[in-house]
């Protein structure tokens, strides 16, 4: 006999509330990083529609997850919005994604909750690869949230982890050539100071949706001691309970940092 939907909904809600209470009693990750994967597969396999609809829903999910993180008092959120490799996709898809990113930056910058919680919006990646409309939206978001430091949203756009490290090495090398620093001065702390996320603690937890179990060139320097969590859920279908489960798993792990 099929269980009535109302009963299953109540059971699900009670289960979610139980995990929510449990998670809020534990220590929150100070920095959550997310590889938002599975938009196209969600559209094709779940909705039976074109990939663009998956990307649209993925953009809406990002806004939802940002507010979940603020409610849970997760201070720093970094999302892999568009990699350097993503430029190899069909030009029409790339253009559509760029338009979505432009819209997201403007909407986040004008979100009253962003200003109430004093969230600094930052973009990491190679701006030389971005079209003018995204650059203008990026500058708008940076200007609107300049001076905020209570929370941080890093949007990785035209980003690659190897690119990030290479840029840091290039800047340090130039300073050494110019005589501003000695080669013997170079250490991990200095390199971290030139990495794109400098000023933000390294991720405590890196979460990837869609069932893929790899990092895909994301935050390679920063993830040295991050906890990793992979879920089979496609990004547009990611639920609050999925976030709670990821945080609960993080809370149950023993972080020894090599000790």
Image: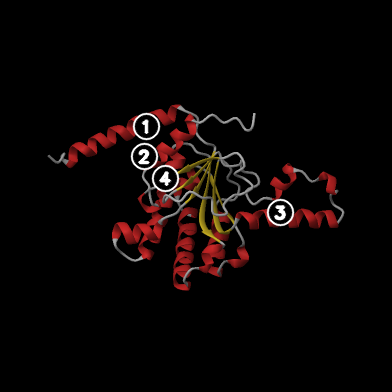
Q: Residue 241, which numbered label?
A: 2
Q: Secondary structure at mark 2?
A: helix
Q: Given contact means CB atoms under 8 Å apart, are the residues at marks 2 and 1 in contact? A: yes
**Upstream in sequence: badge 4 or badge 1:** 1
In three-dimensional space, the C-alpha distance between marks 4 and 1, rounded to whole angstroms, equals 17 Å
Mark 3–mark 4 CB contact (< 8 Å)? no
Choose the circle earlier in sequence order: 3 or 1: 1
First reached walking from the N terminus: tag 2 or tag 1: 1
Local SS, label 3: helix
User: Of marks 2 and 4, which one's residue comes earlier in the chain?
Assistant: 4
Q: Residues within 10 Å of mark 4 (few under 14, many from 20)?
A: some
Give neighbour class at mark 1: few <14, some 14-19, many 20+ (Cα, 10 Å). Answer: some
* Structural distance between the alpha carbons of marks 2 and 4: 12 Å
Q: Position of residue 39 (x, y in %)?
A: 40, 58
Reading the image, the residue beneath label 3 is: 168
> In the depicted view, which residue is nearer to us: 210 or 100?
210
How far is mark 2 from mark 1, CA to CA? 8 Å
Q: Is residue 56 above or below residue 214?
A: below
Label 1 belongs to which residue? 19
- Return the residue at label 4: 231
Proximity of marks 3 and 2: CB atoms separated by less than 8 Å: no
Estimate the spatial distance between the alpha carbons at disc 3 and disc 1, rounded to whole Å: 41 Å
């Amino acid at each position: 006999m099929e269980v009535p939907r109302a009963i299953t909904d109540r059971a699900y809600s009670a289960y979610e509330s139980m995990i929510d209470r449990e998670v809020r009693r534990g220590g929150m990750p100070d920095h959550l990083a997310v590889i938002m994967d599975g938009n196209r597969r969600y559209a094709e396999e779940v909705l039976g529609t074109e990939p663009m609809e998956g990307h649209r829903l993925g953009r809406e999910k990002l806004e939802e997850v940002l507010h979940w993180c603020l409610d849970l008092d997760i201070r720093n959120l970094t999302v892999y919005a568009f990699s350097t490799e993503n430029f190899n996709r069909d030009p029409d898809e790339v253009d559509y994604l760029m338009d979505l990113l432009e819209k997201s930056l403007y909407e986040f910058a004008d979100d009253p909750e962003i200003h109430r919680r004093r969230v600094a919006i930052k973009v990491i990646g190679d701006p030389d690869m971005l079209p003018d409309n995204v650059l203008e939206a990026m500058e708008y978001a940076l200007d609107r949230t300049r001076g905020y430091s209570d929370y941080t949203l890093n949007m990785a756009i035209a980003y690659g982890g190897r690119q990030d490290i290479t840029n840091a090495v290039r800047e340090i090398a130039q300073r050494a050539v110019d005589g501003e620093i000695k080669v013997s001065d170079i250490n991990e702390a200095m390199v971290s100071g030139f990495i794109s996320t400098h000023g933000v603690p390294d991720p405590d937890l890196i979460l990837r949706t869609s069932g893929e179990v790899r990092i895909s060139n994301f935050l390679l320097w920063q993830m040295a001691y991050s906890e990793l969590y992979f879920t089979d859920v496609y990004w547009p279908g990611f639920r609050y309970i999925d976030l709670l489960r990821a945080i609960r798993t993080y809370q149950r792990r023993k972080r020894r940092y090599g000790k």
